[in-house]
Amino acid sequence: MDRGSRDRASRGLLDPSNRTVDQVIEMSRNMDAEPLGLALEIVRSLETVPSSRLANMIETQVYDPEFTEWLELTLLVRESLVRQAPVNAAQYWQDFHYGHIIDRARFQTLVSSYSSFFPTPDRVAVLLPFNGGLAAAGRAIRDGIISAYMEQPGGSAIRFYPSGDDNESALAAYHQAVRDGALLIVGPLRVESVQTLAGLENHAVPLLLLNDPGTGQEAYPQQPGISSLSLSQTEEAAAIAERALTQGQQRAVMIVPESNWGQRIEAAFGSAFVRGQGQISASAYFNPSASDHSAVLTDVLKIDESKQRKQALQSRLGIPLEFEPIRRQDFDFIFLAADSKQGRELKPLLKFHNAGDVPVYAMSRVYSGRAELDSDRDLDGVIFPVTPWQLQAVGKPLPDLESLRDGSFGNLFALGRDAWQILPWLPLLAKDPDLEFHGNTGALTLQADGHLSRQPAWARFSAGRPIPYLWPDQH
């Protein structure tokens, strides 16, 4: 029996998280227990208590101060594991819990001991497309996985399988990985292949899919042991809607391309915004291949109506009038779904049409990922979601990898890194739906359906460079 199987069997037979809180309280009063052993048993026993409930019990002082400290220890250990910052957490613990039997050194040992219960499986298979339309994306994700693996191999062996450009190839790669003894499979990437594997009635090993198998009526059932991680564009659009609403901005103008992608983003943003009691004041649709979008903007901003009012008034009065066209005033911000080239064309036009002072929230595609300071000055002021990896890479030398394409595929490289680094923590995230894994793509939480929901970092263009952006309620 391999190490991963032994650990899973051991946890199934002797899982301390089956204890009640009252039983944990009684255990914590054992003054004869060895400190580290006692602390480890308490932390493991509270695994199924969600972080939000732990925080609430700590804040409201439901229990006596001695046990409350154990609750604080549990929460801090858990968060330090998935945030990968045990040294800082150890110092924090010592500063605020001086005199506790778990001191700074023991805290670090405790984190190390606890992490041993969450090993990466011995044999991991990765299914990615290395030919066809998604080959470039597959190579960027592969290099991200290898980068993270080289930093934290965890005693595991990793093997890549080409998932091809159709469902049959992906299914064949999956079955081959299972026959080769894979204990966990990452991938595939192509959405139709993801849906095929997500719909398997009997999956032999756990799966971490690298795309969203679908939502709503089109959702494919995700059984226990199947999770999914992606750079979901619809989820990103919904995150922008939610962020705007938290700022009290309840009226939006949408500017989206006439394309299938534009339709999906419009639907995702619009439904999330309206669901949060927001109002879509107007929508504009631009031709992605056109270079002049003036007519689209004058129409959606009602500039032409303003000019028509001037002409009507001049006609009635019979004299020429000095007149500045006025745009519509019934919106708080502009939602822009555009790539970097389109954004550079549209943003200056908004300023020209007297909408330069209106907040513009754009999809992540507005940032090419490359250092293009002169061109991106036209995007100054635009706020957009971004992966933390891309934001940290601004102004720094990128890894010497052809797959990164000078940074334009940096988000996919980040996805690959997260796909490897999150593997050990999936069981803990499944027990604690509030726990956030702070990864290269954003803050990830595991939903009940197995989907890893992503909260991105945020950036704003300044002097042509993306800089970190904090929303007013985050200051």
Image (cartoon, grey):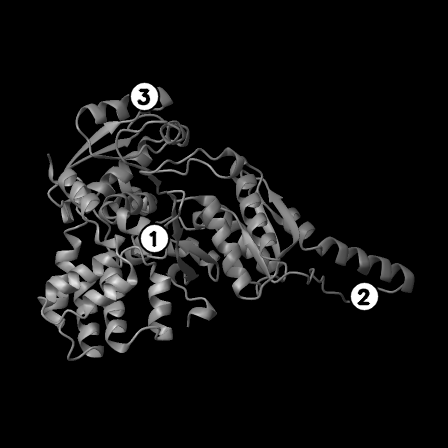
The amino acid sitting under disc 2 is Leu
From what the image shows, is residue 370 above or below residue 121?
below
The amino acid sitting under disc 3 is Ser
Residue under the point 43% across and 60% down: 461
Q: Residue under circle 1?
A: 371
The amino acid sitting under disc 1 is Ala
Q: CA distance from mark 2 to mark 3?
A: 70 Å
Q: Is residue 144 visible in the rendered structure shown here?
A: yes
Which sits earlier in the primary sequence, circle 2 or circle 1?
2
Q: Nearer the viewer, mark 1 or mark 3?
A: 3
Q: Residue under circle 3?
A: 169
Q: Nearer the viewer, mark 2 or mark 1?
A: 1
Q: Nearer the viewer, mark 2 or mark 3?
A: 3
Q: Which of the pair 62/320 is nearer the observer?
A: 62
The local crowd at label 3, few if under 14, some if 14 to 19, many if 20 or more residues have their Cα within 10 Å, is some
From what the image shows, is residue 332 above or below residue 168?
below
Q: Residue under circle 2?
A: 321
In the displayed structure, does residue 455 sit left or right of residue 350? Answer: left
Q: Is residue 400 visible in the rendered structure shown here?
A: no
Hey, which quadrant is residue 377 in on the image? bottom left
Which sits earlier in the primary sequence, circle 2 or circle 3?
3
Which sits earlier in the primary sequence, circle 1 or circle 3?
3
